[in-house]
Image (tube, rainbow, N blue to C red):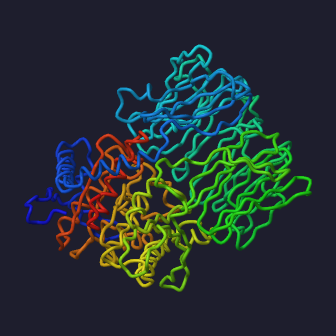
C-alpha cells in the first residue's frame, strides 16, 4: 500500500461557504457547490479523485484483473434460466459465452419447438456505455411486446412496442417511465406509469392505444400526494387491471376489469394513514394481505369482488405475534403462504378444501427460500428457489399433491476447486447496548480458529424493512478462499425478526441500526473471530449511510470500510424536495421540516458529523448519473473527510462517469467493480494474490 512517502498528493477542492438555516439552526456547508454536474469545476474534481484513486491502487491493478478473471471463471457463461409457461408459450432468458447481456426468447407449447428470439440485448446495447431492458410485457394475444429501455442509468425508461410476428418496432416512444406496463384484454390498450421529470417520482398512470400518438394518451390517475408513488399491473387471474399507490406506511388500490379498458378504475379501499394492504384475485374474491386492526406482522383476509371496502374483509389467516406474513401465491387448489419465523423463511402450503396444510422442510439457519415464478393458476406444481451461505441456488418444482420435488437447475460453480463441503456457516447472536439480541449469519472456510487473526468483512443494510437474507455468492468465494469470514449483520431497520424489528430501526429510532452494527462488530472481536486490525465493513446506498455513521461513531473498530453509493448527506437531501425520491422517504427518516426530526437526523447524518479524528482506510464509490443517491453526497463527504481527518489512512473516491445507482449494466463489467473493492480489502490484509 502506498505511503505518504510516495508523494502522491490527494486532490483538494475549493471551499465555498454556503450557509443553511432551518429551525433557527445554522449549518455551514463548504462543499454544497459540488451538487452541479453541469459545472466543469465539479467534473474536474471528480476526475482528479478518479486519477488519485488510480494512482493509489495502481499496484493492485494486476491483482484486480486476476480477481476479475477468477470471479468470471466461476460463472457459466452460456447459461439459461429455467423456462416458465405463460399463455401457451415457454419463456426463458439465456446468456451466450463472452457476452454481457441477456437474450430473451420463447417457444410455443413445447420446449422442443423452435426458439423465437424476442430481444438480443447484446445487439441492442451496441453503441451504449450502459444498457438495461426491463418490464417485458406480452399482450394477451401473444403478438406484441412492450418493454422499457434505459441507456443512461438514470432509471428513466423509454417504453417501446414490438410486433413479435413481423419484428417491427412501432413508432410510439413513451419517455420518462418506470419501464413497466400492462396490457388490457384487447391486446391493443396499454397502461403505463410516468415519472416526474425532476423528482423521478412515479406519479401518473396513462392509457395508450396501439397505433395512436403518444400525445393523445389519456391520464387515468394522478397521484398528487408527493409522499406516494404509483404503479399499474394485472392480477394473476388476468381479470383485473390494478393501480396501486403506496408510501412507506400506507397503501391504496384501484381496480378495473381488464376487458373494459376505457372504464373508470374503482377504489378498492380508500387510503387510511398507517393502513397497508396488498391484493390478489381468485374466482369472485380478493385476498388481502394487511396490517389492519393492529396486525403488525400482517394477516390474510378475504372479500368479495362486489364490495371490497375494509368493513367487509374477513380473517382467513389471523395475525401472529411471532410470525411475519410476507406474501401469498394463489393457485386453483392451493394457497401458498410465505412467512418469516425467528428470522427464517418458511413456505406453508394449504389446500383450499382444508385437506392439506404443511410446511416445506428446511434444515439449517443460514438459508434463503422463496416462491419463484408461478404465472399458471391451474397447476399443482409450485416453483421455488433455495440457497444458503454454503449451497448454490437451486430452482425446484414441487408437486403440492404428491410432495415430490424435482430440482430443475442448480447453479453451476465452474472450476474444479469449488466444493461446498469446504465451507461452514452459522448463526450467532450479539447483545446490543439495550440488551436486544442481534442475529448475524457467518460463512467461512472450514478450519478457521478463533484467535483474533481472521479478516472479517461485515456487511449490513438495515433500512426500509429490507432484509438481507443469507444467500450464496460465487463472487464471495474469492474472499473466503483467502481466509476471510463474511458476516451479515441482521440489524434493526430490516424485517428479519418481524415488522417490529423494522419499526425499531427507523425515524426517531434510526440510531439502533448503527449501534446494532457496532455491537455486532464488538461481538466478533470479543469472540475471537477477528480483531480491530482485521475487521472490515461494507454497505451500499442506505447501507452506505450505515458506513458513514459507524466511522463517525466507532472508527477505531475497523481497519477498512467500503461505502458504495452512500446516502451520507441526510439533512440537506431530506430538506430538498426537488431531489428524486425525497418526499417518499419522510416515513422512513422523518420530515426535517419538523424540528424534532431535523434535530435527530442532524445528530447522525454522516456528512454533518465528520470531525477531526482518525478514520479507517476507506473506499467510496458512486455513479455520476445516480438517481437514488446523487453523486454529490459521497463527493462532498470525501472532500470534508480530506479536510478534517487526522490520519494517513487511505481515502479513495471512485466515480463511475457512465453509470448510476446499480453500477455497470453488463454482467461482467459489474464484476470489475467488485474486483476493485476486494482488491482494496485484500491489499489492506497484505494479500497480494
Q: Nearer the viewer, residue 653 or 584?
A: 653
Q: Nearer the viewer, residue 368 or 270?
A: 368
Residue 343 is situated, as x and y percent measured from the top left of the image, at 62, 69
In the drawing, does residue 579 fall left or right of residue 96?
left
The residue that appears at 55% across and 82% down in the rendered structure is: 436
In the drawing, does residue 537 fall left or right of residue 173?
left
Marks counted in the figure total 0
Indicate whether 254 appears above or below 417. Answer: above
Residue 669 is situated, as x and y percent measured from the top left of the image, at 37, 42
Q: Quadrant of the C terminus?
A: bottom left
> Which corner quadrant of the image does residue 615 belong to?
bottom left
Indicate whether 316 appears above or below 440. Answer: above
Q: Quadrant of the N terminus?
A: bottom left
Indicate whether 1 appears above or below 378. Answer: below
Q: Visible in this render: residue 110?
A: yes
The residue that appears at 45% across and 41% down in the rendered structure is: 155
The residue that appears at 19% across and 52% down in the rendered structure is: 58
Q: Nearer the viewer, residue 594 or 303?
A: 303
Q: Visible in this render: residue 467?
A: no
Residue 684 is situated, as x and y percent measured from the top left of the image, at 27, 66
Residue 261 is situated, as x and y percent measured from the top left of the image, at 71, 29
Q: Residue furthest top?
A: 166
Q: Residue furthest front?
A: 416
> Which corner quadrant of the image does residue 326 belong to?
bottom right
Amino acid at each position: 500500500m502506498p505511503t505518504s512517502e510516495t508523494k502522491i498528493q490527494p486532490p483538494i477542492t475549493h471551499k465555498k461557504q454556503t450557509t443553511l438555516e432551518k429551525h433557527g439552526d445554522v449549518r455551514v456547508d463548504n462543499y454544497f457547490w459540488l451538487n452541479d454536474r453541469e459545472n466543469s469545476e465539479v467534473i474536474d474534481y471528480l476526475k482528479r479523485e478518479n486519477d488519485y484513486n488510480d494512482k493509489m491502487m495502481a499496484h493492485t491493478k494486476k491483482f484486480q484483473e486476476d480477481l476479475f478473471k477468477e470471479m468470471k471463471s466461476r460463472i457459466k457463461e452460456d447459461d439459461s434460466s429455467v423456462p416458465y409457461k405463460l399463455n401457451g408459450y415457454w419463456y426463458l432468458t439465456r446468456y451466450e459465452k463472452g457476452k454481457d447481456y441477456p437474450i430473451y426468447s420463447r417457444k410455443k407449447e413445447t420446449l422442443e419447438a423452435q426458439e423465437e428470439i424476442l430481444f438480443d440485448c447484446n445487439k441492442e446495447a451496441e453503441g451504449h456505455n450502459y444498457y438495461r431492458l426491463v418490464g417485458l410485457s406480452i399482450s394477451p394475444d401473444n403478438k406484441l411486446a412492450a418493454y422499457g429501455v434505459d441507456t443512461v442509468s438514470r432509471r428513466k425508461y423509454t417504453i417501446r412496442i414490438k410486433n413479435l410476428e413481423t419484428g417491427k418496432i412501432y413508432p410510439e416512444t413513451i419517455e420518462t417511465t418506470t419501464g413497466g406496463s400492462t396490457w388490457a384484454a384487447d391486446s391493443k390498450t396499454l397502461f403505463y406509469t410516468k415519472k416526474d421529470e425532476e423528482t423521478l417520482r412515479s406519479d401518473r398512470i396513462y392509457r395508450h392505444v396501439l397505433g395512436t400518438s403518444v400525445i393523445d394518451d389519456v391520464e387515468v390517475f394522478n397521484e398528487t400526494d408527493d409522499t406516494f408513488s404509483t404503479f399499474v399491473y394485472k392480477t394473476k387471474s388476468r381479470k383485473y387491471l390494478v393501480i396501486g399507490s403506496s408510501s412507506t406506511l400506507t397503501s391504496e388500490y384501484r381496480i378495473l376489469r381488464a376487458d373494459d379498458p376505457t372504464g373508470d378504475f374503482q377504489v378498492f379501499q380508500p387510503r387510511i394513514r398507517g393502513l397497508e394492504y396488498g391484493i390478489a384475485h381468485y374466482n369472485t374474491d380478493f385476498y388481502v394481505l394487511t396490517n389492519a386492526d393492529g396486525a403488525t406482522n400482517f394477516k390474510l383476509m378475504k372479500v368479495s369482488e362486489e364490495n371490497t371496502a375494509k368493513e367487509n374483509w374477513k380473517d382467513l389467516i389471523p395475525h401472529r405475534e411471532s410470525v411475519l406474513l410476507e406474501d401469498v401465491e394463489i393457485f386453483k387448489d392451493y394457497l401458498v403462504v410465505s412467512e418469516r419465523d425467528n428470522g427464517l423463511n418458511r413456505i406453508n402450503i394449504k389446500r383450499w378444501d382444508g385437506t392439506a396444510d404443511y410446511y416445506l422442510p428446511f434444515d439449517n439457519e443460514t438459508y434463503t427460500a422463496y416462491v419463484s415464478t408461478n404465472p399458471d393458476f391451474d397447476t399443482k406444481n409450485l416453483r421455488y428457489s433455495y440457497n444458503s451461505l454454503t449451497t448454490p441456488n437451486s430452482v425446484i418444482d414441487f408437486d403440492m399433491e404428491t410432495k415430490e420435488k424435482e430440482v430443475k437447475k442448480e447453479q453451476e460453480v465452474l472450476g474444479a476447486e469449488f466444493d461446498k463441503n469446504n465451507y461452514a456457516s452459522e448463526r450467532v447472536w450479539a447483545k446490543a447496548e439495550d440488551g436486544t439480541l442481534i442475529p448475524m449469519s457467518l460463512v467461512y472456510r472450514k478450519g478457521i480458529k478463533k484467535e483474533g487473526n481472521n479478516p472479517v468483512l461485515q456487511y449490513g443494510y438495515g433500512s426500509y424493512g429490507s432484509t438481507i437474507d443469507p444467500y450464496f455468492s460465487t463472487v464471495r468465494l474469492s474472499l473466503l478462499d483467502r481466509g476471510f469470514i463474511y458476516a451479515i449483520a441482521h440489524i434493526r431497520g430490516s424485517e428479519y425478526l418481524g415488522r417490529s424489528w423494522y419499526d425499531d430501526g427507523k425515524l426517531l429510532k434510526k440510531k439502533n441500526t448503527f449501534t446494532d452494527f457496532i455491537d455486532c462488530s464488538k461481538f466478533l472481536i470479543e469472540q475471537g473471530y477477528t480483531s480491530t486490525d482485521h475487521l472490515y465493513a461494507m454497505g451500499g446506498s442506505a447501507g452506505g449511510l450505515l458506513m458513514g455513521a459507524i466511522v463517525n461513531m466507532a472508527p477505531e473498530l475497523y481497519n477498512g470500510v467500503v461505502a458504495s453509493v452512500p446516502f451520507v448527506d441526510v439533512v440537506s437531501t431530506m430538506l430538498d424536495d426537488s431531489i428524486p425520491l425525497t418526499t417518499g422517504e419522510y416515513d422512513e427518516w422523518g420530515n426535517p421540516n419538523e424540528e424534532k426530526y431535523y434535530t435527530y437526523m442532524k445528530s447522525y447524518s454522516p456528512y454533518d458529523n465528520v470531525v477531526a479524528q482518525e478514520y479507517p482506510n476507506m473506499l467510496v464509490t458512486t455513479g455520476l448519473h445516480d438517481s437514488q443517491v446523487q453523486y454529490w453526497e459521497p463527493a462532498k463527504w470525501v472532500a470534508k473527510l480530506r479536510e478534517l481527518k487526522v490520519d494517513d489512512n487511505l481515502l479513495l473516491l471512485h466515480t463511475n462517469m457512465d453509470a448510476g445507482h446499480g453500477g455497470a449494466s453488463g454482467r461482467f463489467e459489474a464484476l470489475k467493480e467488485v474486483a476493485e473493492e476486494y482488491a482494496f480489502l485484500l491489499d489492506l490484509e497484505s494479500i497480494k494474490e
